[in-house]
Amino acid sequence: MSIGTRMEVPEGKVVVLSFRYLDLESDNLCRYDFVDIYNGHANGQRIGRFCGTVKPGALVSNSNKMLVQMTSDANTAGSGFIAKFSAAEPHERGDQYCGGRLEKPSGSFQTPNWPERDYPAGVTCSWHIVAPKNQVIELKFEKFDVERDNYCRYDYVAVFNGGEINDAKRIGKYCGDSPPAPILSERNELLIQFLSDLSLTADGFIGHYKFRPKKLPTTTVPPTTTTVPATSIAKPTVALCQQKCKRSGTLESNYCSSNFVITGTVITTITRAGSLHATIAIINVYKEGNLAIQQAGKSMSAKILVVCKQCPLIRRGLNYIIMGQVEEDGRGKVFPNSFVMSFKAKNSKILNALKNKTC
């Protein structure tokens, strides 16, 4: 079932939507019951998708129109939501408004109140950067200070390829006081989302972008950066993927040599540029390392990149023990010789023993 509500304020104003109450079926990917917010009334950019009970901050449209659409399946349901909308001046830099469409060849974006004081609580901002079709976008953060959390659950900046919030196209999710490494878009659009919850705040950030020709030399991204663009990590070398797909060593020996060890269920898989991007619903974490783990309620998930899409072969809906390395953006990386095997309940005893043993 899907129900939509259109909101409109006077020309020259923007719509500000605030949730008073939110109670929809909780899922870490919001696949079942959710509410979508769009700019405009038809074919607009999606500002966000929300479920569970954690209310987002104020959402601001980039025009005088906004669409709220709730979708519900036939199973578990919550109480629903209560939200109010109002009109505001566009690009107001006061307590909570920010975001917009950026189309100039270069420019900057920043959190509300920057640099005079901390960003406010309860803010949601989306900057949609659009370059000409034959160009890509380079993004750099000059200063960065967002409430720290191991999984960036509370306040964060998320960057997406394309023009809407879509987990499959997310380049990274960032928080803390270390600026993300320079980011390069796959095509001519990037979406930057900033969200702060209703508790702690921090200094905020200022970022800069510029358009570049589509074909760039590989040296434009320094090798010491903390986040490698998806375009460079998603293309496996032919030689690597021609190797025999066979893990070496034992469960015990691989445990110590791996950056992360988890058990989980494969819930989404997307093939891109010869690699497989998968989301894993976590059953248990035995060795976390720097793996970025997202949490919504009691549900935890992680994203992994299988460098050669069929090596090792993982299938959606099945349970696995997965060991591998971690990209500097927190995503797990699995090579042809990484230790991956079907997970059975009897494996838990061995994994628990390894967890308590020092490598």
Image (cartoon, rainbow, N blue to C red):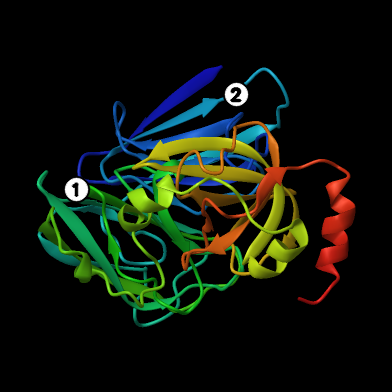
Kind of residue indicated by mark 1: Asn
The residue under the point 64% across, 65% down is: 258
Position of 212 with respect to 207 (left or right) is left
Please tell me which residue lies in front, 91 or 160: 160
Q: State whether residue 317 is above or below residue 94.
A: above
Please tell me which residue lies in front, 146 or 346: 346
Image location (x, y in percent) of residue 185: 26, 54
Count the marks. 2
Q: Quadrant of residue 352?
A: bottom right
Q: Quadrant of residue 217?
A: bottom left
Q: Which residue is the site of mark 1? A: 188
Q: State whether residue 116 is above or below residue 269.
A: below
Please tell me which residue lies in front, 226 or 338: 338
Q: State the SS at label 2.
A: loop
Dot 1 alpha-carbon crowd within 10 angstroms: few under 14, some 14 to 19, many 20 or more: many
Disc 1 from disc 2: Cα separation: 33 Å
Q: State the SS at label 1.
A: loop
Kind of residue indicated by mark 2: Ser
Image location (x, y in percent) of residue 307: 45, 50
Image location (x, y in percent) of residue 355: 81, 66
Quarter placement of the N terminus: top right
The residue under the point 69% across, 44% down is: 341
Please tell me which residue lies in front, 258 or 300: 258
Position of 108 with respect to 338 (left or right) is left
Q: Which residue is the site of mark 2? A: 72
Point out which mark residue 300 bears. none
Dot 2 alpha-carbon crowd within 10 angstroms: few under 14, some 14 to 19, many 20 or more: some
Q: Can see residue 127? A: yes
Position of 285 with respect to 311 (left or right) is right
Quarter placement of the C terminus: bottom right
The residue under the point 36% across, 52% down is: 239
Residue extending furthest bottom?
116
